[in-house]
Amino acid sequence: LGMAVRPLLPVEQRAAEARHGLMVEGVQPEADKAGIAPGDILLAINQVPVTSVEQARALLAQAKGSVALLVQHEGTKGFLTMTLKTGD
Protein backbone atom coordinates (compact mmCIF):
# COMPACT_ATOMS: atom_id res chain seq x y z
CA LEU A 1 0.00 0.00 0.00
CA GLY A 2 3.02 2.22 0.05
CA MET A 3 3.37 2.83 3.76
CA ALA A 4 5.13 1.35 6.76
CA VAL A 5 2.80 0.86 9.74
CA ARG A 6 2.98 -0.56 13.25
CA PRO A 7 0.49 -1.14 16.07
CA LEU A 8 -0.32 1.85 18.25
CA LEU A 9 1.35 2.01 21.64
CA PRO A 10 -1.04 2.40 24.61
CA VAL A 11 0.14 5.99 25.17
CA GLU A 12 -0.58 6.76 21.48
CA GLN A 13 -4.05 5.22 21.76
CA ARG A 14 -4.86 7.48 24.72
CA ALA A 15 -3.42 10.59 23.07
CA ALA A 16 -5.34 9.96 19.84
CA GLU A 17 -8.47 8.74 21.66
CA ALA A 18 -8.34 5.66 19.40
CA ARG A 19 -9.10 2.12 20.54
CA HIS A 20 -7.55 0.64 17.44
CA GLY A 21 -5.44 1.59 14.48
CA LEU A 22 -1.95 1.51 13.04
CA MET A 23 0.67 4.25 13.24
CA VAL A 24 2.08 5.30 9.87
CA GLU A 25 5.86 5.45 10.19
CA GLY A 26 6.83 5.98 6.57
CA VAL A 27 5.23 6.58 3.19
CA GLN A 28 6.14 5.89 -0.40
CA PRO A 29 4.99 8.10 -3.31
CA GLU A 30 1.58 6.43 -3.79
CA ALA A 31 0.60 6.93 -0.12
CA ASP A 32 2.02 10.46 -0.11
CA LYS A 33 -0.02 11.27 -3.24
CA ALA A 34 -3.17 10.06 -1.44
CA GLY A 35 -2.42 12.46 1.42
CA ILE A 36 -1.02 10.06 4.02
CA ALA A 37 1.90 11.27 6.12
CA PRO A 38 4.15 9.79 8.79
CA GLY A 39 2.44 10.19 12.17
CA ASP A 40 -1.05 9.58 10.74
CA ILE A 41 -3.14 6.78 12.22
CA LEU A 42 -4.77 4.28 9.87
CA LEU A 43 -8.11 3.49 11.55
CA ALA A 44 -10.01 1.46 8.95
CA ILE A 45 -9.76 -0.07 5.49
CA ASN A 46 -13.01 -0.23 3.49
CA GLN A 47 -14.97 0.53 6.68
CA VAL A 48 -13.36 -2.36 8.64
CA PRO A 49 -11.50 -1.18 11.76
CA VAL A 50 -7.85 -2.27 11.64
CA THR A 51 -6.36 -3.85 14.74
CA SER A 52 -3.13 -5.40 13.44
CA VAL A 53 -0.65 -5.24 10.59
CA GLU A 54 -1.60 -8.78 9.59
CA GLN A 55 -5.29 -7.88 9.42
CA ALA A 56 -4.51 -4.82 7.30
CA ARG A 57 -2.53 -6.98 4.87
CA ALA A 58 -5.42 -9.46 4.64
CA LEU A 59 -7.94 -6.67 3.96
CA LEU A 60 -5.71 -5.25 1.24
CA ALA A 61 -5.24 -8.70 -0.32
CA GLN A 62 -9.04 -8.97 -0.65
CA ALA A 63 -9.45 -5.48 -2.11
CA LYS A 64 -9.65 -4.83 -5.83
CA GLY A 65 -8.98 -1.58 -7.66
CA SER A 66 -9.03 0.93 -4.82
CA VAL A 67 -9.54 1.15 -1.08
CA ALA A 68 -11.17 3.66 1.23
CA LEU A 69 -8.93 4.45 4.18
CA LEU A 70 -10.11 6.14 7.36
CA VAL A 71 -7.10 8.10 8.59
CA GLN A 72 -6.57 10.37 11.58
CA HIS A 73 -4.24 13.24 10.71
CA GLU A 74 -3.31 15.75 13.42
CA GLY A 75 -6.44 14.85 15.39
CA THR A 76 -8.86 15.05 12.45
CA LYS A 77 -10.42 11.93 10.93
CA GLY A 78 -11.11 11.69 7.22
CA PHE A 79 -11.49 9.23 4.37
CA LEU A 80 -8.88 8.93 1.64
CA THR A 81 -9.05 6.79 -1.48
CA MET A 82 -6.04 4.94 -2.79
CA THR A 83 -5.78 3.07 -6.06
CA LEU A 84 -4.03 -0.25 -5.61
CA LYS A 85 -1.18 -1.22 -7.86
CA THR A 86 -1.48 -4.54 -9.67
CA GLY A 87 -0.23 -7.21 -7.32
CA ASP A 88 -1.09 -5.32 -4.10
Image (cartoon, rainbow, N blue to C red):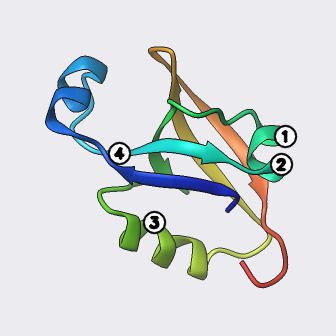
Q: Distance between the Cα atoms at labels 3 and 2?
A: 19 Å
Instruction: Name the residue: 60% across, 45% down.
Output: 26
* Lower sequence index among marks 1 and 3: 1
Tag 4 secondary structure: loop
Tell me the kind of residue under disc 1: Lys
User: Which label belongs to residue 21?
Assistant: 4
According to the picture, the residue beneath numbered tag 2 turns out to be 29
Task: Tell me where residue 23 appears, x and y as whole percent.
Answer: 42, 42
Mark 3 lies on residue: 56
Badge 1 is on which residue?
Answer: 33
Quadrant position of residue 54: bottom left
Q: Residue furthest top?
A: 75
Question: Of the residues tagged 3 and 2, which is closer to the observer?
Answer: 2
- CA gap, disc 1 to disc 2? 6 Å
The answer to which of 29 and 76 lies nearer the viewer is 29
Q: Are marks 2 and 4 in contact (CB under 8 Å)?
A: no
Q: Check if mark 1's residue and mark 4's residue have beta carbons within 8 Å.
A: no
Picture layout, residue 7 above or below residue 18: below
Q: Position of residue 61 (x, y in %)?
A: 59, 81
Disc on the earlier residue, 2 or 4: 4
